[in-house]
C-alpha cells in the first residue's frame, strides 16, 4: 500500500481553511460604502464650519473640527482597517493603545518643555538685540 500524497487542491484548501488565529475579516461592500459616506460627511462638516463661518467663536470652531477629526480616525480604524478587540487575538488593539500612550507622552512632554522654555526665557531689550551677532 502506498500513501497518497496530498494534491495541490488539498494543500490549498488546508492553507486557506486554517485561520492562524487571524479573526479580522475583510469588510463587505456595504461596510466600505458606509465608511466612505461617513468619511465624506466628517470631512464636509468642518469645511462647512470654516467656509460658512457658522460658529461665532474660533475656539468653538477649532474644538468642533478636532472632535470631528477624532471621530473620523475612529471611523477609518473600524471600517477600513477592521480593528476591533477580536482581531489578531486582541494584539492590534493593544498596539493601538500602546501607540496612543507613547504619542500622548511625547505631545504632553513637548508642550511641557516648550511652555517652561517660554516661561523661563530671558527677556531681551532692544540694546541687547543690537549686540547680537
Image (cartoon, rainbow, N blue to C red):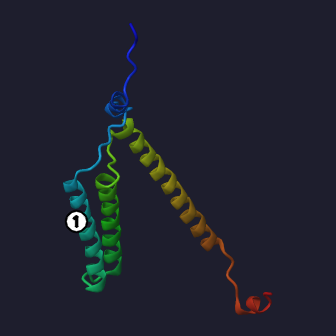
Asked if residue 108 lies left or right of residue 116, the reply is: left
Asked if residue 43 lies left or right of residue 120, the reply is: left
- Residue at 78 percent across and 87 percent down: it is 132
- Residue at 22 percent across and 60 percent down: it is 33
**Image location (x, y in percent) of residue 83:** 34, 47
Q: Write down the quadrant of residue 13 in the picture.
A: top left
Vertical position of residue 122 compared to residue 42: above or below: below
Q: Write down the quadrant of residue 6 in the picture.
A: top left
Q: Write down the quadrant of residue 4 in the picture.
A: top left
**Image location (x, y in percent) of residue 41:** 23, 70
Q: Residues within 10 Å of mark 1 (few under 14, many from 20)?
A: few
- Residue at 80 percent across and 90 percent down: it is 131
Helix, strand or loop at label 1? It is: helix
Front-most of residues 35 and 47: 35
Specify the quadrant that holds the C terminus.
bottom right
Front-most of residues 2 and 16: 2
**Image location (x, y in percent) of residue 37:** 22, 65
Vertical position of residue 131 compared to residue 79: above or below: below
Specify the quadrant that holds the N terminus.
top left
Asked if residue 66 lies left or right of residue 110, the reply is: left
Residue beneath disc 1: 37
Amino acid at each position: 500500500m502506498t500513501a497518497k500524497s496530498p494534491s495541490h487542491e488539498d494543500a490549498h484548501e488546508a492553507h486557506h481553511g486554517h485561520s492562524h488565529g487571524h479573526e479580522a475579516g475583510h469588510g463587505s461592500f456595504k461596510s466600505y460604502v458606509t465608511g466612505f459616506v461617513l468619511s465624506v460627511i466628517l470631512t464636509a462638516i468642518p469645511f462647512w464650519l470654516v467656509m460658512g463661518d457658522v460658529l461665532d467663536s474660533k475656539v468653538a470652531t477649532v474644538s468642533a473640527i478636532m472632535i470631528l477629526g477624532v471621530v473620523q480616525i475612529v471611523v477609518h480604524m473600524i471600517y477600513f482597517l477592521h480593528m476591533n478587540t477580536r482581531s489578531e487575538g486582541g494584539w492590534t488593539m493593544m498596539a493601538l493603545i500602546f501607540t496612543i500612550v507613547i504619542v500622548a507622552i511625547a505631545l504632553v512632554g513637548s508642550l511641557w518643555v516648550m511652555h517652561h522654555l517660554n516661561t523661563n526665557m530671558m527677556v531681551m531689550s532692544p540694546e541687547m538685540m543690537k549686540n547680537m551677532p
